[in-house]
Image (cartoon, rainbow, N blue to C red):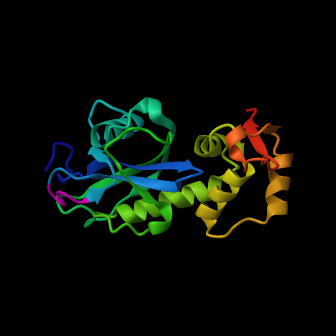
């Protein structure tokens, strides 16, 4: 018994797991994993994660996980957001552990040791409950795409083409959006401005595709 009269109990570990995602027209929507160096599941691909240090806040733990497990530096992270907590007595064979999960939108082409997978290839057969965390992260993106301007801007970059927007929505929903509805949504979005498309964006000699930039 403790001095306060309550029984001592083992406290669960606090883990930070990060779902790195990236989107580019050529590669589509991708998710990154890292090869585990230590048991359990040594040698298998898993989400980059760390145990929370007693001196750091959650977001700093997420940045440390990216840096130490994949080599992705904070400067390459366009957007970082906490997406939820994942628990369960059997999710980690070492001890009871609660995972605080983050989504990290990474600059396309970032040099790292991560392994990138097409989001469409899920499930990725990851250890722990990491497939569940990946699904939750992509559902977070699907539900907030366009309504969450910082998230959508981080994914699409600036400028982006209508074709880029269509590819992203198709990757998130599994269905290509109606062209008329998509063009109307882009044209009436108050934080988007139409601009000249990059020279390489359209077919040579053809009409350049519509391109957009963020005004907020």
Count of all numbered marks drawn on residues in the image: 0
**121 or 215: nearer the eye?**
121
Q: Along the horizontal axis of the image, is 195 left or right of 15?
A: right
Quadrant of residue 131 in the image? bottom left
Say which residue appears at 79% left-offset and 46% top-offset.
Answer: 208
Location of residue 84 with respect to 214 vertically, above or below: below
Percent x, y of residue 195: 80, 36
What residue is at 80 percent from the left and 62 percent from the top? 179
Q: Residue at x 27, y 55 (%)?
A: 97
Q: Position of residue 54 (x, y in %)?
A: 26, 34
Q: Is residue 136 left or right of residue 58?
A: right
Residue 21 located within the stretch drawn in magenta: no
Residue 149 vs 60, above or below: the answer is below
**Residue 169 on image: x %, y %:** 66, 59
Report the predominant secondary structure element of the magenta stretch. loop
Say left or right for 144 vs 123.
Answer: right
From the viewer's perspective, is 52 left or right of 209?
Answer: left
Residue 159 lies, in percent from the top left, at: 69, 38
| Quadrant position of the C terminus in the picture | top right
Image height of 80 relative to 37, above or below = above
At x 61% / y 69%, what residue is drawn? 174
Q: Which of 177 and 88 is in front in this view?
A: 177
Residues 1 and 127: in front is 127
Q: In which quarter of the image is residue 193?
A: top right
Q: Give the range drawn in magenta.
A: 39-44
């Amino acid at each position: 018994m403790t001095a306060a009269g309550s029984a001592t109990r083992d406290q669960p570990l606090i883990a930070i797991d990060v779902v790195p995602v990236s989107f580019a027209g050529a590669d589509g929507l991708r998710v990154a994993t890292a090869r585990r160096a230590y048991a359990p599941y040594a040698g298998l691909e898993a989400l980059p994660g760390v145990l929370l240090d007693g001196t750091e806040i959650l977001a700093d733990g997420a940045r440390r996980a990216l840096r130490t497990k994949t080599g992705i530096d904070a400067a390459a992270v366009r957007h970082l957001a906490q997406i939820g907590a994942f628990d369960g007595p059997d999710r980690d064979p070492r001890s009871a552990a609660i995972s605080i999960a983050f989504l990290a939108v990474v600059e396309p082409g970032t040099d790292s040791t991560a392994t990138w997978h097409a989001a469409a290839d899920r499930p990725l057969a990851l250890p722990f409950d990491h497939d569940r965390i990946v699904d939750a992260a992509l559902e977070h993106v699907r539900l907030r795409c366009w309504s969450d301007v910082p998230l959508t801007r981080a994914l699409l970059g600036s400028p982006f083409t209508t074709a880029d927007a269509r590819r992203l929505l198709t990757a998130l929903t599994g269905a290509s959006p109606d062209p008329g509805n998509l063009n109307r949504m882009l044209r009436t979005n108050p934080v988007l401005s139409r601009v000249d498309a990059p020279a390489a964006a359209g077919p040579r000699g053809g009409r350049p595709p519509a391109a957009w930039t963020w005004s907020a």
